[in-house]
């Protein structure tokens, strides 16, 4: 919380209040259910491939994560190769993921 305008050059007195609280408290208050988060929605308990670790990148230890599944897992009836006639690049065996275990990305990515 900031009281006053820290960007106002004439206002040298502003109050910054920082409150730390558990991320788990915030998730609980938002009603997010963490149990079953690894299950691909609308499937019979198929799970995402999930991996997380750290790696050294440009002499800095950074966290990396990768979560994904094959298109056919979550596309239901549309997970068939027959639908490639509408999109030549569609292959239900391709992997949809975010993150990369081999290269950190600070801006995020979906492949």
Image (spheres, rainbow, N blue to C red):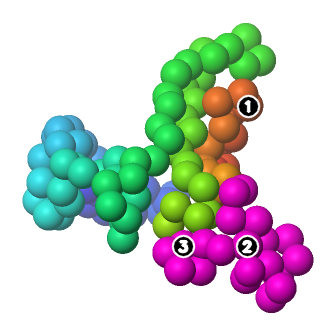
Residue 89 belongs to magenta span: yes
Residue 103: numbered disc: 1
Q: State the residue position of label 2.
A: 81
- Give how far across and how far down residue 38 sits, in percent: 35, 48
Quadrant in which the N terminus is drawn: bottom left
Q: CA separation, marks 2 and 1?
A: 30 Å
Front one among 64 and 82: 82
Count the numbered circles shown.
3
Residue 30 belongs to magenta span: no
Q: Is mark 1 on a helix, strand or loop?
A: loop
- Give how far across and how far down residue 37 sits, in percent: 30, 52
Q: Which of marks 3 and 1 is in front?
A: 3
Q: Nearer the viewer, mark 2 or mark 1?
A: 2
Q: What element carries label 2?
A: helix
Is residue 15 in sight in this rendering? no
Quadrant in which the C terminus is drawn: bottom right
Labels 2 and 1: the sequence-earlier one: 2
Q: State the residue position of label 3.
A: 75
Q: What stretch is highlighted in magenta?
A: 75-94
């Amino acid at each position: 919380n900031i009281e006053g305008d820290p960007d106002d050059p004439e206002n040298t007195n502003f109050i910054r209040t920082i409150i730390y609280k558990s991320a788990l408290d915030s998730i609980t208050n938002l009603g997010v259910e963490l149990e079953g988060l690894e299950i691909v929605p609308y499937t019979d308990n198929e799970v995402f491939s999930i991996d997380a670790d750290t790696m050294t990148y440009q002499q800095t230890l950074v966290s990396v994560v990768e979560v994904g599944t094959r298109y056919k897992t979550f596309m239901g009836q549309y997970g068939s190769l027959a639908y490639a006639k509408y999109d030549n690049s569609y292959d239900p065996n391709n992997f949809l993921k975010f993150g990369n275990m081999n290269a950190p990305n600070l801006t995020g990515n979906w492949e």
